[in-house]
Amino acid sequence: MAVEPDSAGVRFPPPVVYLGALLLGLAAERFVTLRSFGIDWRLLVATGALLFVAGAAMMLAAAGLFRRLGTNVPPSKPTTLIATTGPYRWTRNPMYLGMALIYAGLAIGFDGPIAFALLPLVLIAIQTQVIAREERYLEAKFGDDYRRYKAEVRRWF
């Protein structure tokens, strides 16, 4: 992924991190004894579907807002403004929160406890390698406006 100079400097697409860990966890299920949550499959599928839909809706709403506002979605491209409406009223990172909900939904829906157990590691990687860079970039670019927004709106939820 090409990183533009006026950007957060994120060097890998965050969706690839979520997807890679999910696939690794689901593949590991084949080689480990713990292969199931031990819950009825209908409940797993229903819970997984609910989380997936909620995450997709949040992620699509946030990305759609960025497009309507005329700013870039990929963190490797310049940010032209601070989004503070839509899902950004409640969380500073609705796209990453949406991806986490999608990940959890798929891990649960596919009865993947190992994949689900990897989610905290993914969130740590996203926090330290993506969000921290984005926040430094936004503070440097937008100064007090971003600091005020940051003080008013939680990072995750």
Image: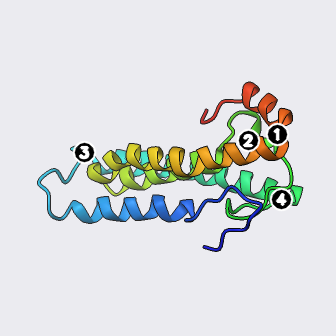
Disc marking residue 67 = none
Disc marking residue 87 = 2
Please indicate whether residue 91 sits to the left or right of residue 72 in the image. left
Name which residue type carries label 2.
Answer: Pro
- What crowding class fits label 3: few (fewer than 14 Cα within 10 Å), some (14-19), or many (20 or more)? some
- 1 or 2: mark nearer the eye: 1
Name which residue type carries label 1.
Answer: Thr
Q: Residue at x 73, y 31 (%)?
A: 150
- Reading the chain from its start, which is encountered first: label 4 or label 3? 3
- 4 or 2: mark nearer the eye: 4
Instruction: Return the residue at label 4.
Output: 71
- 3 or 1: mark nearer the eye: 1
In three-dimensional space, the C-alpha distance between marks 4 and 3, rounded to whole angstroms, equals 41 Å
- Reading the chain from its start, which is encountered first: label 4 or label 1? 4
Instruction: Return the residue at label 1.
Output: 84
- What crowding class fits label 4: few (fewer than 14 Cα within 10 Å), some (14-19), or many (20 or more)? some
Q: Nearer the viewer, residue 113 or 126?
A: 126
Q: Residue at x 22, y 50 (%)?
A: 36
Query: What is the x, y in percent for residue 103?
Result: 46, 53
- What crowding class fits label 1: few (fewer than 14 Cα within 10 Å), some (14-19), or many (20 or more)? some
- Note whether residue 8 is visible: yes
- 4 or 3: mark nearer the eye: 4
Name which residue type carries label 4.
Answer: Thr
Instruction: Return the residue at label 3.
Output: 37
Q: Describe the element under mark 3 as helix, strand or loop.
A: loop
